[in-house]
Image (cartoon, rainbow, N blue to C red):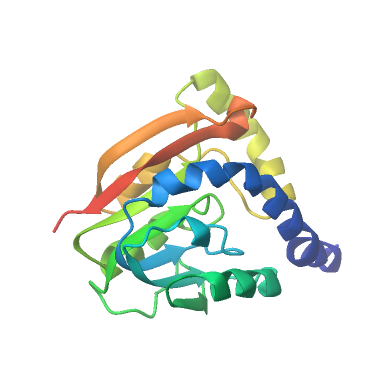
Amino acid sequence: MGRIYDFYEKRIFPHGLELAMRPMAELRPRVLENAQGEVLEIGFGTGLNLPHYPDSVRRLVTADPMAVMPARAQRRIAAAPFPVELYHLPADGGLPFASDRFDCVTVTWTLCTIPDPVAALREARRVVRPGGRVLFIEHGRSDDARVARWQDRWNPIQKFIACGCNVNRKVDDLFRDAGFVIDSLDRFCLDGAPRFLGETYRGIARRDG
């Protein structure tokens, strides 16, 4: 079973995820429009964000635990108008970057799969400069108690079939627990998605001091 699941996680699931994320392309520009300077992206995947970064970005550094579909990722990196440095490492461990280094951090549909998302965000807070921001879009826990109960029931199945993805994390609380200030937050459900899967948090968190 372990070998089969490992094959599924590394060879089959990434292709399905890539297809599933394509409809999200229209949401990415609004999330990334305020990115600038030297940016750290946590959860690079296959580089789906790359075409949507604005001209104000001068360098992108990425942190991702897996090399997923590397040929496709490399093609997107080669087409980027700025340098891209790709690091394969867990975001909830210690990041090998100096404190206060980055102007901005981006996190898109990633916090759901990180084993310790608060630890990852604390590292993001350490490496972003004072006053620097995290631009994020994530799916997560509903404010509707009935939907949230369904999310809790479904979550063990979700984690298995989606390789560690959680549907019931309250994303704004994760940022606050990591020491960020939430400057803006939009809540909505993705078009065409059931609420227990499509509840979405989009916003900007700031390192205050």
Number of marks in picture: 0
As drawn, the residue found furthest toward the left would be 209
**Percent position of residue 172, x then y:** 36, 41
**Percent position of residue 49, x then y:** 51, 57
Quarter of the view holding residue 190: top right
Q: Quadrant of the C terminus?
A: bottom left
Up the image or down, 196 lies above or below 139; here it is above
150 left or right of 134 in image = right
The residue lying at 80 percent from left, 60 percent from top is 12
**Percent position of residue 78, x then y:** 56, 76
Choose between 49 and 197: the one closer to the eye.
49
Up the image or down, 107 lies above or below 141; here it is below
The residue lying at 41 percent from left, 62 percent from top is 120
**Percent position of residue 167, x then y:** 57, 40
Up the image or down, 123 lies above or below 34; here it is below
Choose between 203 and 48: the one closer to the eye.
48
Choose between 170 and 110: the one closer to the eye.
110
The residue lying at 75 percent from left, 52 percent from top is 16
Q: Quadrant of the N terminus?
A: bottom right
Quarter of the view holding residue 71: bottom right
